[in-house]
Image (tube, rainbow, N blue to C red):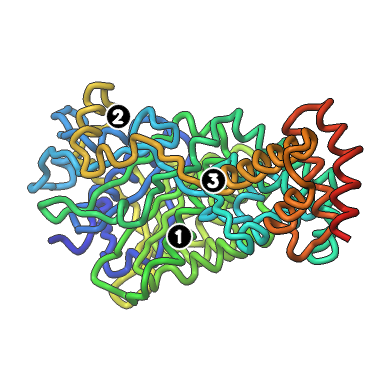
Amino acid sequence: MEHDILIGTGEIQARLLGRMANRHGLITGATGTGKSVTLQTLAEGFSRMGTPVFLADIKGDLAGLSQPGTDHPRIRERVEKLGLDDHTFEAAPVVFWDVYGELGHPLRTTISEMGPLLLARLLNLNEIQTGVLNIAFRLADEEGLLLLDLKDLRAMVQYVGEHAKELTATYGNVSAASVGAIQRALLTLEDAGGDRLFGEPAISLDDLIQTDPQGRGVINVLAAEKLYHSPRLYATLLLWLLAELFEQLPEVGDAERPKLVFFFDEAHLLFDDAPKALVDTIERVVRLIRSKGVGVYFITQNPLDVPLPILGQLGNRIQHALRAFTPRDQKAVQVAAETFRPKPGLNTAQVITQLGVGEALVSCLDAKGTPQPVERVLIAPPRSRIGPITPEERQRVIQHSPVYGVFEKQVDRESAYEILHQQTESLAAKAGAVLEGKEDSGGLLDGLLGQSGRRRGDSLAQTLIKSTARAIGSRLGREIVRGVLGAILGKGK
């Protein structure tokens, strides 16, 4: 089993050591300079090392990892120039995932697993609206109501809105405007297809951390061509996966190789308009997750896209060409140059603007964890196909996947939506029976207070009766509100 990855060769070989790969990394460069091929070479290397990989395929070209490469004059020239005597064309073990279930196995999580912080980011809520969302989560937890999909969350937020008066004393102000804003944001998310992300069966970390029969790490490829058009959904999903790795994996220290390597392509989307609390959380996770055996690699055009506190934690650097046409570009070149350990005789800032396609400046950590001097190299070519695959090839990979058939059919078990809906229907039936004289109003009162009113009293009864009225029709609803409400509350007193 290999314990390092050949990135490229210049005056010397630039290699990424397996035991230093959990110190994270950065791949930057302008569009068309070769970042995707470099990512592909690294992913293959980690796979041969026995380390599973997770990456997002935004353009569809990384799907080529699943197919063996083919002989090409340019590849042959690069192989000969680098002296890669052991270079062979082979496919890597790949599992395709897709939030929309079209180009891979459906990738889902639950509302509860996502949590209020990331959901607030996904829904673009302000601080006050986020507070209301937190109340919905807290109340669901106290009442034992599962939040699995969007209809569960929508029902829970509606429940909070209908009980705003009695909840305010315990949890703080719940305004109708905030509830309405959350519901509109949920509708927008659903229209964008975000509802496909939430539900069961949900993905687990065990599904991502797998090896094939030869001991190679499985490369999990998230088909993100469609997902990328919803940048906030894309970024939130990747942040959730990173948070799950941090929370669930045990401490392993510095092992011979990482347990998993996570690539964040288009990393700027993670930080655009992100609240400080979220950026602080990302910084903390990146700082501490290496002890869990996870390496995090950011891929972006400009090193300025990554906040400096996080940039300082990325020990392995690969810099493709940058353009210096604008003041911001010039600043990016200077920042990139200053992050490398200098090499005598190499003007880093000047070379960054002169690199050709497939060339890069590389500095990795040595065995002691010290950054090596920057080296100008030609990137080693991948062994798998460079470029997209056919729909038939993709389907063959999906059907031979170890998780095929597990996630394809969605399950909708009883959760918050079903429970709250059943309560409303039950109360509606009781209310109708009271109006028709078939049941005493005390039975309805007992039902109201027995289900949810043990702490909140008459105001809850009023709210539930009004929601019941809406459920069984406007005319009958008005009769309930006018006639039954007084009778029930009178008896309750």
**Residue at x-position 15% and y-position 60%:** 2
Q: Position of residue 265 (x, y in %)?
A: 45, 44
**Is residue 441 among what the camera can see?**
yes
Instruction: Report whether 368 appears left or right of 134.
Output: left
From the viewer's perspective, is residue 329 above or below residue 472? Answer: below
Q: Position of residue 182 (x, y in %)?
A: 72, 43
Quick one: SS at disc 1?
helix
Instruction: Report whether 415 appears left or right of 64.
Output: right
Q: Nearer the viewer, mark 1 or mark 3?
A: 1
Quick one: SS at disc 2?
loop
Residue, disc 2? 387
From the viewer's perspective, is residue 85 above or below residue 393? Answer: below
The dot on residue 235 is 3
Q: Of callouts 1 and 3, which one flags the residue occurring earlier in the amino acid sequence?
A: 3
Disc 3 marks a residue whose amino acid type is: Ala
**Residue at x-position 65% and y-position 45%:** 423
The dot on residue 244 is 1
Quick one: SS at disc 3?
helix
Image quadrant in which you'd find residue 433: top right
Q: CA distance from mark 1 to mark 3?
A: 14 Å
From the viewer's perspective, is residue 82 above or below residue 482? Answer: below
Crowding at label 3, few (<14), some or many (≥20) Cα neighbours within 10 Å?
A: many
Q: Position of residue 12 (x, y in %)?
A: 24, 58
Q: Of callouts 2 and 1, which one flags the residue occurring earlier in the amino acid sequence?
A: 1
Q: Nearer the viewer, residue 240 or 314?
A: 240
Disc 1 marks a residue whose amino acid type is: Glu
Q: Nearer the viewer, mark 3 or mark 2?
A: 3
**Residue at x-position 20% and y-position 54%:** 211
Disc 2 marks a residue whose amino acid type is: Gly
Image quadrant in which you'd find residue 283: bottom right
Crowding at label 1, few (<14), some or many (≥20) Cα neighbours within 10 Å?
A: some
